[in-house]
Amino acid sequence: MHGLLVSLLVSLLALPCGTARAQPLQLLVFANPGLFDVAADGTVSGPGANVLAKIGQLSGVPLDILALPIPRALATASSMPGSCAVGLARTPEREASFLWAGPLASGALVIYARADETQALQGLLDLRGRGVVVQRESAPAAWLREQGIAAQETNNSVTALRMLQARRVDFWFANELAAEPVIRTEAGPAVRSMLTLRRVDVYVACQVATPPEQVDRLHQAIQKLRRQGDLAEFGLR
């Protein structure tokens, strides 16, 4: 009898726990008024957060959304399994550093100026010698570096807009996905689009040790949202 009880106990311990909740993925976003709005208690809302909630529902993967400054978000997504940066451009130097889901959105790169700016722009090289601001670790920042064009870098779109409005710089080079919501929601002197350039897709980028099946479920959920038309407002049809 004793041997039978021991065998039964071992068998029960070997069974998987069907009620255990999967470890949630931590989705790291950058505060951006009108896209990712962050309350005083850290709660993230807005259109971007709504889409992430839909991805969680469709994928069945539990998700925690956390807003962090860009440098800290990228450092966390690069080093902590189960962490994913939302809205990252997929570049050759980043490709092997993350597991990718998406694309989640697609936006044009746009040069903005104050409404009273008179200089016409023909291309990116016209920014040489002028004061330019970009968001740190963004596709516009990388493109300017490739072209050898100096620019000031900020951690968020609001600061970049304020610098342009205050005449601390002449132009703001940004992805329209981040810039347009801020322009609509923030007060101050009017700004306008001067030149629209190439489009860039952005993705959910997860730390390489994140369970691949979870990342794949995110990817499949994003694809389904795109087919349903839920990502049209984010430039994907």
Image (tube, helix red, strand yellow):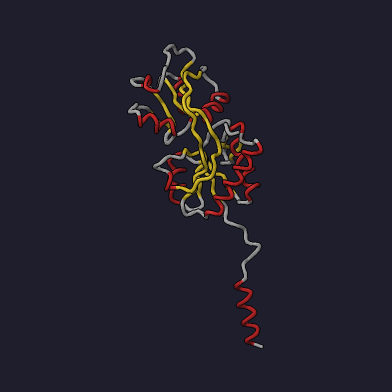
Q: Is residue 135 visible?
A: yes
* Quarter of the image that includes the N terminus: bottom right
Q: Camera-side residue: 56 or 198?
A: 198
Q: Is 57 left or right of 133, judged from the image as shown? A: right
Number of dots carrying numbers: 0
Name above or below for residue 208 compared with residue 133: below
Q: Is 60 left or right of 114, judged from the image as shown? A: right
The image position of residue 59, as x and y in percent, is 62, 49
The image position of residue 152, as x and y in percent, is 38, 28
Question: Which residue shows up at 50% across the image and 43% down it?
Answer: 85
* Quarter of the image that includes the C terminus: top right
The image position of residue 234, as x and y in percent, is 58, 33
Name above or below for residue 121 compared with residue 51: above
Name above or below for residue 43 compared with residue 153: below
Name above or below for residue 178 compared with residue 88: above
Question: Which residue shows up at 61% across the image and 32% down it?
Answer: 232
Which quarter of the figure has residue 9?
bottom right
Q: Camera-side residue: 123 or 145?
A: 123
Q: Is residue 50 visible?
A: no
Q: Is 83 left or right of 170, judged from the image as shown? A: right
Question: Which residue shows up at 60% across the image and 39% down it?
Answer: 49
The image position of residue 176, as x and y in percent, is 52, 27
Question: Which residue shows up at 39% across the image and 33% down it?
Answer: 142
Which quarter of the figure has residue 149?
top left
Q: Camera-side residue: 1 or 232?
A: 232
